[in-house]
Amino acid sequence: MAAETQAQRMTVLIADDHPLFRTALSNAVNQCLDAPDLQTVGSFDELRAALEAHATADLLLLDLNMPGARGYSALVHARSVAPALPVIVVSAYEEASVARASLDHGAAGFIPKSASPETMTEAIATVLDGRSWAPDMPDAPENSDDAFTDKLALLTPQQQRVLIMLTDGLLNKQIAIDLDISEATVKAHITAILRKLGVHTRTQAVIAARSLEIDWASYGRGSQGAAGD
């Protein structure tokens, strides 16, 4: 197996809010690597901390729909703070459009949660070998949001959090309280966000940011149901 040539004690981050599936992914990683250093998290905030604590991690297995994440926001954040880190998106939503968008947003691979353990192991080994991996699916339309994704990657992690809060409709005062910063700092972040995204108003920024969201309900279940997958 190609992954057998990888150095021992590689660090793999697993971000999924469902403990049983974290275990399944851990087992798949253990099939590929000799005694890997596995770091598991269950929310976007925990993922942010893990990316800081393990800046030289070798692989991230990422569930899109975790507490604190919105659509592809966790993927874009990981790609912005750790551009050299290969990311495999693992999702209960198996439509070709989700797989294609994940790859367009910088993922090195996409694994449906219905995949067999053997398929998960193969995908992980392939990405660790420096290649990309995705299941055979019908072609999806080209993603037209690549330019915005590139701009979003210019935001600092704090600016990304502010932008997510703006899409939730929070006022500057509420954002300041939640992030424990001053309203003046919030306004400075918003000014920087508008400049980096190339828009003129916070409404335009919110509309653009929502291009990263996934309408989970359109796939048969809302986000609460998916979180337990």
Image (cartoon, rainbow, N blue to C red):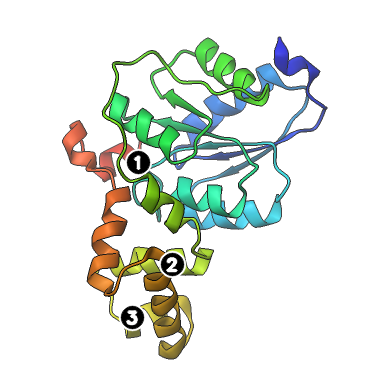
Q: Secondary structure at mark 3?
A: helix
Q: Amino acid at mark 1?
A: Ala
Q: Amino acid at mark 3?
A: Gln
Which picture quadrant has residue 226?
top left
Which picture quadrant has residue 190?
bottom left
> Which label sits in the foreground, 2 or 1?
2
Query: In the image, residue 191 lies at what x, y percent?
Result: 40, 79
Most foreground residue, 43 or 146:
146
Tell me the residue that label 2 is attached to: 196
In this picture, residue 40 sits left or right of residue 178: right
Most foreground residue, 161 or 76:
76
Tell me the residue that label 1 is attached to: 227
Residue at the (43%, 57%) spot, across then down: 152
Does residue 229 appear in this view? Answer: no
Does residue 215 appear in this view? Answer: yes
* C-alpha separation, residue under disc 3 versus residue under disc 1: 26 Å
In this picture, residue 32 sits left or right of residue 174: right
